[in-house]
Image (cartoon, coloured by chain):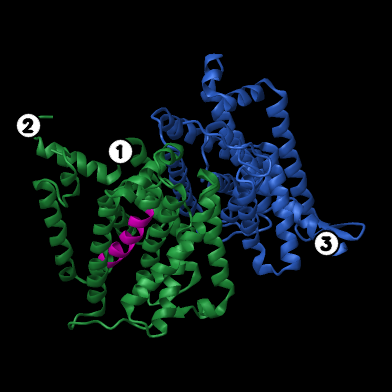
């Protein structure tokens, strides 16, 4: 039982990061109907910005908010510069997916050019090895911080989306773009805000992942795929679904690693998703598809 | 003019003088290539191999509109099936067909969820398939040859050709067969059904197209092409490791399809040439390759959604109608 709890906690901590990534993807998908394949790479750019500032001797309090800002600005620039013109021209779903793949490739090459492919250690205020004991289980400082970051990220997003005027505008735009435009909501700016805040969430996940892994230009690939899987598991159109999907995926993965063997950890996530999708194609909390001809 | 007036026009292989001239130039280039040095033979071989896979994925993604990210998995299945068949002494052409068939069988299995899943949901399911194949290969040593990887017997060249030149001839011949087959397929009932499914599933079903048959067929055919691509790639390399078949391979295929032109045969070949030649162009500055790929697909989607094939078609029409616009 202790072992179970121990792995469940580790899984929840990883899952809260998947949830952050998934929240960003869902936010973007809900508002602009685009699957953002550059989400992981935007987070990488933000994390590397923090790394560059920290290695110049700047403090964490300065570097981390700036990193979130860098990610957000990159996404907003992409939205205004590329995506909005393409959507105005009536790009297809496939075309928009390919646009984000293009952005991902550009950012990837850029990070490799500036920072090289050698892995680095990311300095971080919380330690990975120092653990606190809660009854029978041990939790490292970093895991606690990660859980807290996940909670804070979800909470802030919830408050913004549900309790502010801006959030109301976001919900209106995602519900019916034309009607929102007619009502005088500045839809382009609201959508850009959605892209920016989603990318900031991704960077937040990246900042907490980097100290646990080594920092190299491809370190976000795996968490991005997991976040994507979590978003699909919960239902791409549902923000609570993303959180549920992320936490479920993280826990299931950690428990599978403990009881079935480490080599099945990565595959299991996708097997679970495949099974869930075969039973409920719209994801756990998603709405059923309806199509008009 | 590019006017199609009858079914016979539609079926004609090369319409118009300029197309024939261009085809002639392409064939002359392909024949002249082996005489221009070993580096170009290797590049030509890679273009032919890649083009076969891109043709297949263009059928699935461009014609049938099924966004699939499982290419790496099909490539790996084709490559490893070929390696084991060739290792058991099966003649190489049969082994290549075996690689394609193994991938096609996997394609049918992956195609089943596509009956219920759409767009992003299908993308994640196929992505999961690619990762699962990689994990199986990485964890089952008798399949993948363990840590040292799997070595293949070298193919025996005929007619006194060098090994590289022989592979070039075989791969080019196969590319011609596959390109011809694809051109025919696209203008047949099956191709039309694929496009109808892409444009509206409900409308296609109402017109009497079986969604299940069409989608499974799209996955089977495209995976067969990709399996053959994997088999030829294995034959070309002579050594296999699971790491070869990663997500980067999938992205490269998307770049090739987009830059070449969606749902176009000549576009697939041009796109394959693009993704093979650009890395050769940049040489040691490897970071520039993804940047150039990314910028190229952004530029194509914004300024010329038809890709290189669309540009070619416009140029041809311009020349044919010349004094008039």
User: Can I make out residue B272 in this image?
Assistant: yes
Boundaries of the magenta span? B44-57
Q: Secondary structure at mark 1?
A: loop
Res. B304 mark = 1
Q: Real-space Cα distance between discs 1 and 2?
A: 24 Å
**Magenta-colored stretch includes residue A127:** no
Write down the residue under mark 2.
B323
- How would you rate the neighbour count of disc 3 (Cα within 10 Å): few for under 14, some for 14-19, many for 20 or more? few
**Magenta-colored stretch includes residue B51:** yes
Q: Real-space Cα distance between discs 2 and 3?
A: 79 Å
Write down the residue under mark 3.
A4
Where does residue B178 sit, x and y in percent of width and height?
Answer: 28, 61
Residue at image coords 25%, 51%:
B266
Q: Is residue A287 left or right of residue B303?
A: right
User: Do badges 2 and 3 share one subunit?
Assistant: no
Answer above or below: position of A262 versus B6. below
Hue used for the chain lettered A? blue
Where does residue A283 sit, x and y in percent of width and height?
Answer: 64, 44
Please tell me whether the stretch drawn in magenta is mainly helix, strand or loop.
helix
User: Do badges 1 and 2 share one subunit?
Assistant: yes
- How would you rate the neighbour count of disc 2 (Cα within 10 Å): few for under 14, some for 14-19, many for 20 or more? few
Hue used for the chain lettered B? green
User: Can I make out residue B288 in this image?
Assistant: no
User: Do badges 1 and 3 share one subunit?
Assistant: no
Answer above or below: position of A213 versus A78. below
């Amino acid at each position: 039982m202790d072992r179970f709890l121990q792995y469940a906690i580790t899984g929840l901590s990883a899952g809260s990061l998947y949830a952050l990534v998934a929240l960003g993807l869902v936010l973007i998908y809900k508002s602009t109907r685009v699957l953002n394949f550059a989400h992981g790479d935007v987070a990488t750019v933000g994390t590397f910005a923090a790394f560059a500032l920290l290695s110049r001797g700047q403090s964490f309090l300065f570097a981390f908010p700036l990193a979130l800002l860098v990610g957000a600005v990159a996404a907003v620039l992409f939205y205004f510069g590329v995506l909005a013109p393409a959507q105005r021209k009536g790009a297809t779903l496939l075309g928009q997916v390919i646009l984000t793949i293009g952005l991902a490739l550009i950012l990837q090459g850029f990070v490799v050019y500036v920072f090289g492919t050698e892995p680095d250690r990311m300095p971080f205020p919380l330690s990975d090895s120092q653990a606190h004991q809660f009854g029978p289980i041990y939790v490292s400082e970093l895991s606690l911080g990660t859980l807290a970051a996940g909670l804070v990220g979800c909470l802030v997003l919830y408050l913004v989306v549900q309790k502010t005027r801006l959030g109301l505008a976001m919900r209106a735009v995602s519900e019916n773009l034309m009607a929102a435009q007619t009502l005088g909501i500045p839809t382009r700016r609201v959508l850009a805000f959605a892209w920016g805040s989603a990318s900031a969430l991704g960077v937040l996940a990246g900042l907490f992942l980097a100290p646990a892994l080594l920092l190299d230009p491809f370190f976000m690939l795996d968490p991005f795929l997991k976040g994507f899987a979590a978003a699909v598991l919960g239902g791409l159109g549902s923000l609570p679904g993303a959180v549920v999907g992320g936490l479920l995926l993280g826990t299931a993965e950690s428990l599978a690693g403990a009881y079935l063997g480490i080599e099945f950890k990565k595959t299991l996530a996708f097997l679970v998703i495949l099974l869930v999708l075969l039973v409920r194609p719209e994801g756990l909390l998603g709405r059923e598809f309806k199509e008009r001809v | 003019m590019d006017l199609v007036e009858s079914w016979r026009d539609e079926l004609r292989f090369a319409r118009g003088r300029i197309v024939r001239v261009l085809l002639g130039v392409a064939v002359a280039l392909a024949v002249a290539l082996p005489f221009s040095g070993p580096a170009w033979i290797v590049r030509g071989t890679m273009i032919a191999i890649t083009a076969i896979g891109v043709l297949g994925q263009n059928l699935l993604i461009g014609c049938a509109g099924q966004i699939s990210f499982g290419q790496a998995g099909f490539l790996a299945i084709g490559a490893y099936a070929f390696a084991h068949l060739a290792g058991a002494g099966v003649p190489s052409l049969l082994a290549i067909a075996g690689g394609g068939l193994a991938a096609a069988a996997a394609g049918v299995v992956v195609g089943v969820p596509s009956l219920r899943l759409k767009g992003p949901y299908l993308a994640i399911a196929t992505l999961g398939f690619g990762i699962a194949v990689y994990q199986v290969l990485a964890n089952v040593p008798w399949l993948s040859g363990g840590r040292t990887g799997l070595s293949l017997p070298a193919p025996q060249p005929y007619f006194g050709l060098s090994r590289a030149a022989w592979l070039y001839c075989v791969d080019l011949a196969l590319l011609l067969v596959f390109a011809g087959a694809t051109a025919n397929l696209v203008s047949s009932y099956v191709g039309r059904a694929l496009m109808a499914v892409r444009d509206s599933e409900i409308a296609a079903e109402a017109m009497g197209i079986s969604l299940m048959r069409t989608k499974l067929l799209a996955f089977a055919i495209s995976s067969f092409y990709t399996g053959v691509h994997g088999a030829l790639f294995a034959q070309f390399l002579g050594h296999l490791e699971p790491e070869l078949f990663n997500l980067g391979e999938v992205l490269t295929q998307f770049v090739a399809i987009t830059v070449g032109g969606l749902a176009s045969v000549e576009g697939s070949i041009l796109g394959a040439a693009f993704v093979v030649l650009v890395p050769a162009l940049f040489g040691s500055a490897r970071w520039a390759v993804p940047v150039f790929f990314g910028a190229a697909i952004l530029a194509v989607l914004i300024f010329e959604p038809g890709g290189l094939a669309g540009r070619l078609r416009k140029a041809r029409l311009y020349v044919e109608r010349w004094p008039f616009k």
